[in-house]
Image (cartoon, helix red, strand yellow):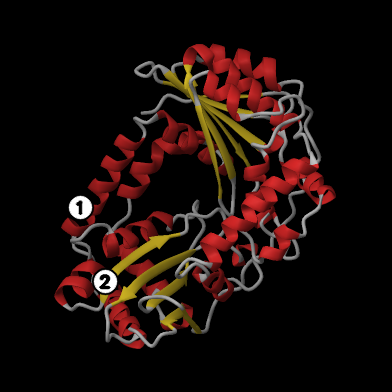
């Protein structure tokens, strides 16, 4: 059982804390409740741009990284469709440096034209490198446009179009910052070699005077239920053909969420799982194949991706995958197979949370979902899934009418 302490400052900042005196380090993690889902179709990629801008200098601190490095710490961040997460790991003797830095950039960025231009250039180049110039790089854009028709999950975190970042101006940047990067829209998670009392003292000292703000959060459109097979084919300069299949699934707090998670593990968690066993070793169809879920706050999608072997058509590959999925629909999963993936999940959770960085990140995420104490229920929720529930979910989702498929052909006439 993970010890969790909680507190809320008067300005709305939620604090979650868990001590670990086996390490000499502290993780200070700030999660902002803003991601690509909070953008509008005309201006996408802003949340990801801010992941970079937040390191470009704040109102009182022109250089963010140097004080951390001088204090023996490290920092990083990531953005998803749902959240933006920043974290600093630092020796406990210098932990106040992390509170000082994070509070200043929550108060206000420097908003200099130079910082905007530098970070805009970095993000544009990242878009080109990861989406335009990398094999299969635009697959997320293409597949999401098939799966989502009204919800903002229809574009990936990096943005819908490179021009959106190229054209962003300072007024839009300021509007986005003050609408989302606020104490009443954030979680401060602190783990490692620090007491709850010291965490509260430093939180009050550095964050309490930052005012709460009027947030720009708006109700999001609900994605209509899919009732038709959707299909797209493209040709690109890639070495082999690739198959992408997506099926709509529930949100991460839904009662069936862990059933979807287990189904993805049964299909592709390790060499002994069903997709590699059947379609890589017994009947070679794919050189690689994977199944995974989108653990998103709103209903996401269950995805299967495979690179085909030479001479294998994508139609044959899709038919082969559906035969594996049909087995999940038609036959109950054996208790030993279910127990195997449940055991792997439990061991991964236990070992994962010995890392105070992972713990801080997940405490913040569960708090944004409603209660950081949910982290202590993960294994129980995963183990409570039954074979009957798995078959019910498989019957509900693994049908042709709910599938979105992307055929990614090599333009050179290869596989």
Which callout, 2 or 1, points at the residue further toward the start of the chain?
2
Q: Is residue 45 left or right of residue 90?
A: right
Q: Which mark is residue 287?
A: 2
Q: Which mark is residue 340?
A: 1
Q: CA distance from mark 2 to mark 1?
A: 25 Å
Q: Which image quarter: residue 60?
A: top right
Q: Residue 179: image x %, image y %?
A: 77, 44
- The quadrant of the rendering that contains the C terminus is bottom left
Q: Which image quarter: residue 264?
A: bottom left
Question: Up-down: is 146 above or below 363?
Answer: below
User: Which mark is in front, 2 or 1?
Assistant: 2
Q: Residue 275: image x %, image y %?
A: 26, 69
Residue located 63% across and 50% down the image: 122
Question: Up-down: is 382 above or below 124?
Answer: above
Q: Secondary structure at mark 1?
A: helix
Q: Is residue 158 left or right of residue 106?
A: left
Query: Is residue 187 visible from the viewing direction of this image?
Result: yes
Q: Total of numbered circles in the picture?
A: 2
Q: Secondary structure at mark 2?
A: strand
């Amino acid at each position: 059982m993970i010890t969790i302490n909680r507190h809320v400052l008067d300005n709305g900042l939620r604090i979650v804390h868990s001590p670990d005196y086996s390490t000499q380090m502290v993780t200070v993690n700030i999660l902002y409740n803003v991601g690509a889902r909070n953008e509008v179709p005309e201006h996408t990629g802003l949340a990801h741009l801010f992941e970079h801008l937040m390191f470009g200098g704040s109102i009182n601190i022109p250089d963010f990284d140097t004080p951390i490095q001088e204090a023996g710490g490290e920092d990083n961040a990531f953005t998803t469709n749902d959240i933006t997460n920043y974290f600093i790991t630092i020796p406990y003797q210098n932990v106040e440096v992390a509170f000082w830095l994070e509070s200043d950039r929550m108060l206000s960025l420097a908003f200099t034209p130079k910082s905007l231009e530098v970070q805009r250039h970095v993000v544009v180049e990242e878009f080109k490198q990861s989406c335009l110039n990398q094999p299969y790089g635009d697959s997320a854009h293409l597949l999401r446009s098939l799966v989502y028709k009204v919800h903002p999950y229809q574009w990936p975190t990096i943005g819908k179009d490179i021009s959106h970042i190229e054209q962003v101006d300072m007024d839009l940047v300021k509007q986005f910052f003050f609408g989302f990067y606020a104490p009443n829209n954030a979680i401060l998670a602190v783990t490692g070699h620090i007491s709850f009392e010291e965490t509260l003292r430093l939180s009050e000292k550095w964050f309490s005077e930052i005012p709460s703000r009027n947030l720009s959060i708006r109700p999001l459109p609900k994605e209509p239920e899919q009732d038709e097979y959707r299909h797209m084919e493209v040709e690109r300069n890639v070495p082999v053909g690739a198959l992408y299949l997506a099926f709509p699934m529930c949100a991460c707090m839904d009662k069936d969420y862990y059933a979807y998670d287990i189904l993805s593990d049964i299909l592709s968690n390790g060499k002994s799982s069903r997709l590699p066993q059947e379609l890589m070793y017994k009947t070679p169809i794919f050189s690689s194949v994977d199944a995974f879920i989108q653990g998103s706050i709103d209903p996401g999608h269950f995805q299967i991706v495979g690179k085909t072997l030479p001479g294998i058509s994508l139609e044959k590959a899709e038919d082969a995958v559906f035969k594996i999925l049909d087995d999940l629909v038609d036959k109950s999963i054996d208790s030993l197979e279910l127990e195997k993936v449940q055991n792997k999940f439990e061991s991964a959770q236990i070992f994962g949370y010995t890392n105070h960085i992972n713990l801080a990140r997940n405490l913040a995420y569960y708090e944004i979902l409603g209660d950081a104490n949910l982290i202590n229920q993960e294994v129980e929720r995963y183990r409570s899934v039954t074979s009957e529930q798995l078959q019910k979910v498989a019957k509900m989702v693994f049908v042709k009418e709910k599938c979105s498929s992307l055929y990614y052909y090599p333009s050179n006439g290869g596989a």
